Amino acid sequence: LHKHRELEPRAAVESPNQRRTAERHALAPNTLSAPGVERGRERMSPPVAFLKTHRTGASTVQNILFRLGERENAAFAFPSHTLQFHYPERFRASFVDELPLGLSEFDLLCSHMRLDLQEVRKVMPQNTIFITLLRDPIKTFESVFRYHTSSVPAFLRAHRAASHTGRSALSIFVESPETFWHPNETRNGLAKNPLSFDMGLNHQKWNGSWPEDLARLEEAFHLVMIAEHFDESLVLLGALLGLDHEELAYVRLNARARNSITEMDEKTQAKIRSWNVLDTLLYDYFVQVFWEKAAQFGLERLKLETAGLRGSVEKVRQRCISRSEVAPGELEDLLRPWQTDTATIVGYEVRGNLSLQDQGFCVRMLLPELQYHSHLYFRQYARDMRAAPAD
Ligand SMILES: Nc1ncnc2c1ncn2[C@@H]1O[C@H](COP(=O)(O)OS(=O)(=O)O)[C@@H](OP(=O)(O)O)[C@H]1O
């Protein structure tokens, strides 16, 4: 495997994201790879398009898919620039990088985008499995607000208005969101119904086509996972993709430190719900669809499999992690998640004295998105991921 390449993201101004050591890390071999997998393609699973929604637990699912793709030497449909498909623009097939030399189709797509189903279908093979992940809209919004405060104009205004008031920017925002939010302003997609926005729906207001749009999404997606039933969701994902418990085992990635979570009283929660009413509609709809799928799978079987998966998750934690919820400043570069100026994202310390094989397995399990993406991108194209084009 190539050496992990350091990246200089365009916006790397905050010290928590700066590479503080000159150390370069080689990723130890992927223990789950069959020998020689670097050369030949060893695809066993169907092609997958994973719509990576914001602040839902999607990096954790993406990590499972990254590991799957690396193991099987899959061709990733990566964005041509950065980690995201020109977000928050609506996805277009032209945002995808070229097919790797000698290949005729992509196998996996799992980077952030605003969905356009027809455009994704132009990129992915016909038998692609479509999956995504939704989270309780109140929790999602609180997380999105805190994490993306500086990059979403409406949030930034509320943040400024809150300074010196002793109140949270979130409570000030939801008290009168229209004061801070302008419908035509770009980069405000996440400021109202972020889940619906990512799903490509009209996220500003309900209209007559909503029921039809929801039904179309239901038809298109083989599985809409639910973060509140994360393990059950993974069991259903495993059944779709033919993955066993060890392949589905995960650690919770991209989580905020406790002091970066805004406490919400009931009034604030109710206001968040009403500002994001379309997300509630979307979420409730797919929770119901989820339990229909679970019933088809068999509820007793689901319970058993979930317990089995949890056992594997626990084993992986024991095997790989020496410390959890580690502050970014204490993490080595390779394992430090991307930070924003309004949220601290914690990570993990990998156990010392691991065999080379275990190191390869464990480091991949804990790799934050940027590091894993750039590793896979380099592996696929033998060049570094491109920075965002200049405006
Ligand atoms: N397994 C599992 N179950 C439940 N919740 C989980 C899980 N994995 C990650 N998380 C929580 O998801 C939040 C991060 O989401 P994303 O990775 O989608 O964020 S991002 O959009 O890629 O930045 C982040 O939420 P907050 O900590 O509330 O911000 C994570 O804690």
Image (cartoon, helix red, strand yellow):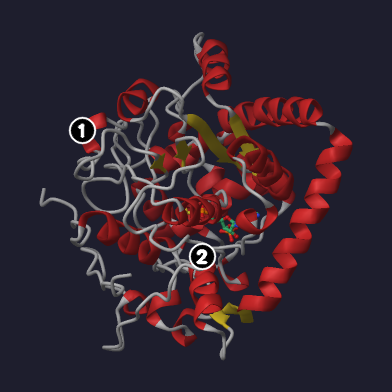
Q: Of label 2 and label 1, which has the lower sequence position?
A: 1
Residue 228 visible, this orientation: no
Q: Nearer the viewer, residue 266 or 3?
A: 3
Residue lying farthest to the left in this orientation: 390
Q: Could you tell me which residue is drawn at 63 percent across and 26 percent down?
A: 281
Task: Tell me if label 2 and label 1 are in contact, CB under 8 Å.
Answer: no
| Residue 305 coordinates in the image, percent (x, y) | 80, 47
Question: On screen, 188 above or below 81?
Answer: above
Whether disc 2's CB lies below 8 Å from ligand 1 is answered no
Query: Looking at the rendered structure, which numbered label has been put on residue 165?
Result: 2
CA separation, marks 2 and 1? 46 Å
Left or right, 385 with reference to 294: left
- At mark 1, the secondary structure is helix
Q: Could you tell me which residue is drawn at 39 percent across and 63 percent down?
A: 372
| Residue 183 coordinates in the image, percent (x, y) | 36, 31
Q: Could you tell me which residue is drawn at 67 percent across and 50 percent down?
A: 244
Whether disc 1's CB lies below 8 Å from ligand 1 is answered no
Residue type at tag 1: Ser
Left or right, 60 with reference to 136: left
Which image quarter has ligand 1?
bottom right
Residue occupied by mark 1: 94
Question: On screen, 287 above or below 82?
Answer: above
